Amino acid sequence: MNPMTKRRRRHTPEQIIRKLAEGHKLMAGGMTIEEVCRQFGIAESSWHRWLAQYGGMKADDAKRLKELETQNVRLKRIVADQALDIDMLKHLNDQKW
């Protein structure tokens, strides 16, 4: 298969954390980072990015982080809508009837 036509696969945070834990066990058993990455089918840069982002987390932590990020997006949208409403009301209030 041509590497340029390979589909990019997205990993869930839970999958990433599991692979990091498994990778650390494999490296403790003597494998190199290159071998671990080849076994998982990922680039070494992905391993280092995952380690920086999810290094000390457990699967439950990652799930909670995702929930908080989703909630944060929703709350930001609510605040933006309220700011628009306030701006519209100020504009209406400033008009001379």
Image: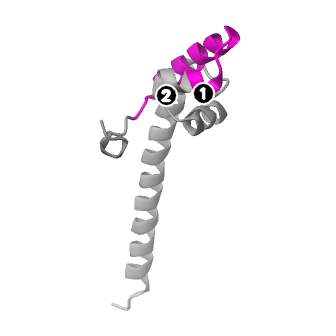
Q: Which amino acid type is shown beneath numbered disc 2?
A: Pro
What colour scheme has been applied to the protein in the rendered image? one colour
Identify the residue shown where x is 45% and y is 60%.
Answer: 80
Instruction: Give the SS element for disc 1.
Output: helix
Q: Which amino acid type is shown beneath numbered disc 1?
A: Glu
The answer to whether 58 is drawn above or below residue 80 in the figure is above
Instruction: Give the SS element for disc 2.
Output: helix
How far across and down, in percent of the image, does residue 77 sit? 42, 54
Query: Quick one: label 1 or label 2, which is nearer the N terminus?
Result: 2
Q: Quadrant of the N terminus?
A: top left
Q: Please say whether residue 16 is one of the residues in the magenta stretch.
A: yes
The answer to whether 63 is drawn above or below residue 25 in the figure is below
The answer to whether 39 is drawn above or below residue 26 in the figure is below
Quarter-of-image position of residue 87: bottom left
Identify the residue shown where x is 42% and y is 53%.
Answer: 78
Q: Are marks 1 and 2 in contact (CB under 8 Å)?
A: no
How far across and down, in percent of the image, does residue 81 sit? 40, 60
Q: Which residues are magenta?
A: 10-35
Compared across the picture, whether 45 is left or right of 93 comes to right
Identify the residue shown where x is 44% and y is 39%.
Answer: 70
How far across and down, in percent of the image, does residue 27 sit? 66, 15
Label 1 to label 2: alpha-carbon separation: 21 Å
Tell which residue pokes out farthest to the front in this image.
2
Of 13 and 73, nearer the camera is 13
Q: Main secondary structure of the magenta part?
A: helix
Q: Which residue is mark 1?
A: 34
Q: Which mark is residue 13?
A: 2
Identify the residue shown where x is 47% and y is 56%.
Answer: 79
The answer to whether residue 9 is seen in the rendering is yes
